[in-house]
Image: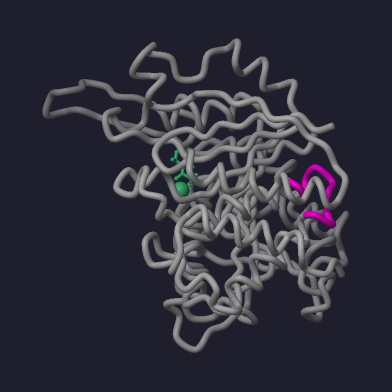
Amino acid sequence: MYKIAVIPGDGTGTEVIREGLKVLNVLSNRLNFKYETITYDLGGERYKKTGETLPESVLDEIRKTDAIYLGAIGHPDVKPGILEKGILLGLRFGLDQYINLRPVKLYPGVETPLKGKGPNEIDYVVVRENTGDSYTGTGGFSMKGTPHEVATQTSVYSRFQVDRCLKWAFEYTRKHGKKAQGKGKTNTLALVGKTNVLTYVYNLWERAFHEMGAKDYPDVERGYYHVDATCMWMVKNPEWFDVLVTGNMFGDIITDLAAITQGGMGIAAGGNINPEGVSMFEPIGGSAPKYTGKNVINPLAAICAAGMMLEILGEAKAAKLLDKAVSEALGNKEVKSLQAGKMGMSTSEVGDLIAKKCVELKID
Ligand code: IPM
Ligand code: MN
């Protein structure tokens, strides 16, 4: 029996999580796994009422669950940063979810802005370190408000943080790289950095990467790209990539670029993973206030996030079936577009469609 903490959060979060839970329910019936959900009302409305973002008592309760399923965080009435830092980053840091896994996969039938590229070319994974870098809050102001004001926000990495992230990325590449999937000749992990300018932080990453790779993962091919060049290749030659690993800030930036190449925020899902603890799964699109309550937002990213959650919980069969259902719905153009309001059906109808496929499709 899995215990799942559900945090619908703000805006369209509620609508997309509802559809994800619909699909989860169908899968649990068909594939005989059991779960219970505990819903938490964390988000902008609670903050407006109580001034709380993520109370310690809630975090402690969530520590006892098996996974977190999160909708979206961000409210138009709340100053940017408060909810994001308090809730989203509060959970990531509080639960030491040190991996942010972001698959970049173009499903068949989905339009990409990359000319001449299809599902065979856009199919890789970004492993973003999730607890360090300029996200640690190290820094501050001095002489604030004067013409001499100075602001710093430092990129911070310890060898420990880098090593544990790299280890996870190497293991992941060995198990899920292109060779392991029968799609290529090698399993390749490439470090994305900036060793020509950030000569401390990415020098540490680079040394740790090659030391670990040479010693423990000789079977995994190693690559390196500067982050700026990565942005070019993500557009021009995404087929070069298998698994990419990078720091928190670069990872944040390149995964938005990656997301648009796979069809945008309607489909992009991510996992915040603590391999020894509680992991959290979310669509990465945000709360979309403009579309809230209209039943027009695309729930596929949230549904795919539920798939990632099933995979990590050990329900690989269910995860695979969910992926097949999404792939078919898109491949057959049953869902016409990934954009809110242009799907040719409502949010709940997309959920119904995927749920129906999860009942009817053959399990391979
Ligand atoms: C993401 C988001 C968050 C981040 C924000 C909302 C704090 O952009 O999940 O990529 O920067 O990590
Ligand atoms: Mn981001």
Q: Please give left or right for residue 179 compared with residue 324 in the image.
A: right
Residue pushed farthest left?
147
Figure quadrant of residue 260: bottom left
Residue 97 % position (x, y): 66, 35
Total numbered labels: 0
Question: In the image, what residue occupies the spot 56% across and 24% down?
Answer: 40
Q: Is residue 213 magenta?
A: no
Taking depth in this image into account, of 39 and 147 the one nearest to the observer is: 39
Taking depth in this image into account, of 143 and 330 the one nearest to the observer is: 330
Residue 251 % position (x, y): 53, 52
Taking depth in this image into account, of 25 and 109 the one nearest to the observer is: 25
Question: In the image, what residue occupies the spot 80% across and 75% down?
Answer: 186
Question: In the image, what residue occupies the spot 41% across and 50% down?
Answer: 295
Residue 313 % position (x, y): 80, 42
Figure quadrant of residue 170: bottom right
> Is residue 229 shown to the viewer in this render?
no
Question: In the image, what residue occupies the spot 48% across and 69% down?
Answer: 263
Residue pushed farthest bottom?
116
Relative to 235, residue 25 above or below: above
Residue 95 % position (x, y): 65, 27
Relative to 130, residue 291 above or below: below
Image quarter of the N terminus: top right
Image quarter of the C terminus: bottom right
User: Which secondary structure type mostly characterizes the magenta part of the structure?
Assistant: helix
Magenta extent: 310-318
Relative to 174, residue 116 above or below: below
> Is residue 280 shown to the viewer in this render?
yes
Q: Does the magenta stretch include residue 312?
A: yes
Q: Please give left or right for residue 296 compared with residue 101 in the image.
A: left
Q: Please give left or right for residue 104 compared with residue 218 in the image.
A: left
